Image (spheres, helix red, strand yellow):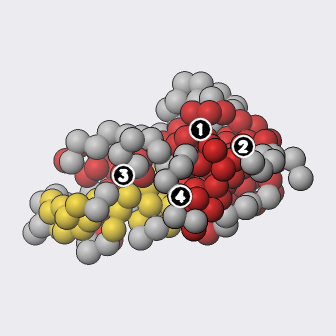
Amino acid sequence: MAIQFIVNGRPQSVDVPANMPLLWVLRDTLGMTGTKFGCGMALCGACTVHLEGEAARSCITPISSVAGKKITTIEGLSPDRSHPVQRAWIEVDVPQCGYCQSGQIMSAASLLAKNAKPSDSEIDEAMKGNICRCGTYQRIREAVHRAADLHKASAQLSGFGAASDPEDALQEQPVEAGGAA
Protein backbone atom coordinates (compact mmCIF):
# COMPACT_ATOMS: atom_id res chain seq x y z
CA MET A 1 0.00 0.00 0.00
CA ALA A 2 1.34 3.41 -0.97
CA ILE A 3 2.13 5.92 1.79
CA GLN A 4 1.61 9.56 0.93
CA PHE A 5 3.31 12.50 2.60
CA ILE A 6 4.93 15.82 1.70
CA VAL A 7 8.69 16.27 1.48
CA ASN A 8 10.10 19.77 1.06
CA GLY A 9 6.74 21.04 -0.13
CA ARG A 10 6.21 18.32 -2.73
CA PRO A 11 3.69 15.47 -2.44
CA GLN A 12 5.32 12.05 -2.40
CA SER A 13 3.90 8.57 -2.60
CA VAL A 14 6.02 5.53 -1.82
CA ASP A 15 5.21 1.85 -1.86
CA VAL A 16 7.54 0.46 0.80
CA PRO A 17 7.09 -1.64 3.95
CA ALA A 18 5.21 0.35 6.63
CA ASN A 19 7.99 -0.15 9.18
CA MET A 20 10.78 1.09 6.87
CA PRO A 21 12.57 4.00 8.55
CA LEU A 22 11.95 7.41 7.02
CA LEU A 23 15.74 7.82 6.65
CA TRP A 24 15.95 4.96 4.16
CA VAL A 25 12.88 6.14 2.27
CA LEU A 26 14.48 9.56 1.89
CA ARG A 27 17.90 8.23 0.91
CA ASP A 28 17.21 5.03 -1.01
CA THR A 29 13.72 5.51 -2.43
CA LEU A 30 13.65 9.27 -3.04
CA GLY A 31 17.39 9.79 -3.63
CA MET A 32 17.69 12.58 -1.06
CA THR A 33 21.09 11.85 0.47
CA GLY A 34 21.59 15.02 2.53
CA THR A 35 20.13 13.32 5.59
CA LYS A 36 22.81 11.02 6.99
CA PHE A 37 22.88 7.64 8.70
CA GLY A 38 24.91 7.72 11.88
CA CYS A 39 23.82 5.20 14.48
CA GLY A 40 20.36 3.87 13.61
CA MET A 41 19.24 4.33 17.23
CA ALA A 42 18.44 8.10 17.38
CA LEU A 43 21.51 8.75 19.54
CA CYS A 44 23.69 10.86 17.24
CA GLY A 45 21.34 13.25 15.42
CA ALA A 46 22.90 12.85 11.95
CA CYS A 47 19.51 11.82 10.56
CA THR A 48 17.56 14.82 11.90
CA VAL A 49 14.75 16.17 9.73
CA HIS A 50 11.72 18.29 10.53
CA LEU A 51 8.45 16.43 10.96
CA GLU A 52 5.60 18.94 11.04
CA GLY A 53 8.18 21.57 11.97
CA GLU A 54 9.75 19.65 14.87
CA ALA A 55 13.19 18.07 14.85
CA ALA A 56 12.82 14.30 14.49
CA ARG A 57 15.26 11.41 14.10
CA SER A 58 14.43 9.80 10.78
CA CYS A 59 16.40 6.61 11.50
CA ILE A 60 13.76 5.40 13.98
CA THR A 61 10.68 7.02 12.43
CA PRO A 62 8.63 4.39 10.59
CA ILE A 63 7.37 5.67 7.25
CA SER A 64 3.82 4.70 8.24
CA SER A 65 3.91 7.33 11.01
CA VAL A 66 4.46 10.18 8.56
CA ALA A 67 1.49 9.45 6.30
CA GLY A 68 -0.19 12.75 5.43
CA LYS A 69 2.48 14.79 7.24
CA LYS A 70 5.04 17.39 6.17
CA ILE A 71 8.74 16.55 6.20
CA THR A 72 11.55 19.03 5.64
CA THR A 73 15.05 17.75 4.93
CA ILE A 74 18.32 19.66 4.67
CA GLU A 75 17.67 19.89 0.91
CA GLY A 76 14.38 21.68 1.61
CA LEU A 77 15.61 24.18 4.19
CA SER A 78 16.45 26.57 1.32
CA PRO A 79 17.20 26.03 -2.35
CA ASP A 80 20.31 28.24 -2.31
CA ARG A 81 21.80 28.05 1.21
CA SER A 82 20.13 31.33 2.09
CA HIS A 83 18.48 30.10 5.29
CA PRO A 84 20.00 32.03 8.22
CA VAL A 85 21.31 28.83 9.82
CA GLN A 86 23.01 27.72 6.62
CA ARG A 87 24.51 31.18 6.10
CA ALA A 88 25.76 31.26 9.69
CA TRP A 89 27.28 27.78 9.37
CA ILE A 90 29.24 28.94 6.34
CA GLU A 91 30.27 32.28 7.89
CA VAL A 92 31.47 30.71 11.13
CA ASP A 93 33.10 27.82 9.23
CA VAL A 94 31.52 25.22 11.49
CA PRO A 95 32.17 21.91 9.71
CA GLN A 96 35.35 19.91 9.80
CA CYS A 97 34.45 16.53 8.33
CA GLY A 98 30.87 17.71 7.78
CA TYR A 99 29.15 14.37 8.30
CA CYS A 100 26.93 15.50 11.20
CA GLN A 101 26.23 18.95 9.84
CA SER A 102 22.89 18.37 8.12
CA GLY A 103 21.49 17.04 11.39
CA GLN A 104 23.10 19.86 13.36
CA ILE A 105 21.65 22.48 11.01
CA MET A 106 18.16 20.95 11.13
CA SER A 107 18.22 20.88 14.95
CA ALA A 108 19.44 24.48 15.08
CA ALA A 109 16.74 25.61 12.64
CA SER A 110 14.09 23.89 14.75
CA LEU A 111 15.39 25.61 17.89
CA LEU A 112 15.41 29.06 16.26
CA ALA A 113 11.88 28.56 14.92
CA LYS A 114 10.73 28.32 18.55
CA ASN A 115 13.25 30.60 20.26
CA ALA A 116 14.55 33.57 18.29
CA LYS A 117 17.28 34.49 20.79
CA PRO A 118 18.40 31.38 22.69
CA SER A 119 20.96 31.52 25.48
CA ASP A 120 24.05 29.32 25.48
CA SER A 121 22.36 26.87 27.84
CA GLU A 122 19.23 26.72 25.66
CA ILE A 123 21.39 26.04 22.60
CA ASP A 124 23.31 23.33 24.47
CA GLU A 125 20.04 21.72 25.59
CA ALA A 126 18.51 21.79 22.09
CA MET A 127 21.67 20.48 20.43
CA LYS A 128 22.63 17.83 23.00
CA GLY A 129 21.18 15.03 20.87
CA ASN A 130 23.54 15.87 18.01
CA ILE A 131 27.04 14.44 18.25
CA CYS A 132 29.96 16.03 16.43
CA ARG A 133 32.93 13.64 16.41
CA CYS A 134 35.20 16.54 15.39
CA GLY A 135 34.20 18.53 18.47
CA THR A 136 33.07 21.76 16.79
CA TYR A 137 30.56 22.50 19.56
CA GLN A 138 31.87 26.04 20.26
CA ARG A 139 31.53 26.96 16.58
CA ILE A 140 28.08 25.36 16.46
CA ARG A 141 26.96 27.51 19.38
CA GLU A 142 28.51 30.61 17.77
CA ALA A 143 26.73 29.83 14.49
CA VAL A 144 23.36 29.46 16.22
CA HIS A 145 23.81 32.91 17.76
CA ARG A 146 24.87 34.28 14.36
CA ALA A 147 21.84 32.71 12.68
CA ALA A 148 19.58 34.33 15.28
CA ASP A 149 21.11 37.70 14.43
CA LEU A 150 20.77 37.09 10.68
CA HIS A 151 17.14 36.06 11.12
CA LYS A 152 16.43 39.15 13.23
CA ALA A 153 18.02 41.38 10.58
CA SER A 154 15.95 39.72 7.83
CA ALA A 155 12.77 40.18 9.86
CA GLN A 156 13.57 43.84 10.42
CA LEU A 157 14.13 44.36 6.72
CA SER A 158 10.93 42.60 5.72
CA GLY A 159 9.02 44.59 8.33
CA PHE A 160 10.10 47.77 6.60
CA GLY A 161 9.48 46.39 3.14
CA ALA A 162 13.13 46.87 2.23
CA ALA A 163 14.71 44.84 -0.52
CA SER A 164 18.15 45.13 1.00
CA ASP A 165 20.54 42.47 2.24
CA PRO A 166 20.34 41.43 5.93
CA GLU A 167 24.08 42.06 6.10
CA ASP A 168 23.37 45.79 5.64
CA ALA A 169 21.00 45.77 8.59
CA LEU A 170 23.56 43.92 10.70
CA GLN A 171 26.15 46.61 9.98
CA GLU A 172 23.99 49.00 11.95
CA GLN A 173 23.59 46.84 15.06
CA PRO A 174 26.04 45.10 17.35
CA VAL A 175 26.42 41.38 16.77
CA GLU A 176 27.36 39.17 19.68
CA ALA A 177 29.46 36.27 18.48
CA GLY A 178 30.09 33.20 20.56
CA GLY A 179 27.16 33.79 22.88
CA ALA A 180 28.60 36.76 24.74
CA ALA A 181 25.93 38.45 26.80
Residue situated furthest right in the rendering: 181
Q: Identity of the amino acid at label 3?
A: Gly
Q: What element carries label 3?
A: helix
Labels 4 and 3: the sequence-earlier one:
3
Residue drawn 55% across the image and 46% down it: 165
Q: What element carries label 4?
A: loop
Q: Of the residues under marks 3 and 2, which one precedes in the sequence?
A: 3
Task: Please name the residue that numbered disc 4 is placed on.
Answer: 162
Disc 2 residue type (three-letter) = Gln
Q: Earlier in the sequence, mark 1 or mark 3?
A: 3
- Residue 87's place in the image compared with 156, above or below, is above
Question: Residue at point 15% right, 63% down?
Answer: 13
> Residue 76 at what x, y percent from top left?
36, 52
Mark 4 or 3, closer to the camera: 4
- Which numbered dot is residue 89? 1
* Real-space CA distance between mark 4 and mark 2, rounded to the nearest whole angstrom: 15 Å
At mark 1, the secondary structure is: helix
**Residue at the spot of label 2:** 171
Q: Is mark 2 on a helix, strand or loop?
A: helix
Q: In which quarter of the image is residue 107?
A: bottom right
Say whether residue 37 is visible. no
Query: Mark 3 against mark 2, which lies toward the viewer?
Result: 2
Taking 92 as reference, is 97 left or right? left
Label 3 belongs to which residue? 76
Q: How dense is the environment of label 3, judged by Cα within 10 Å: few (below 14), some, or many (20 and up)?
A: some
Give the class, few, some or many, for how many residues have Cα within 10 Å of label 1's Cα (few <14, many ≥20). many
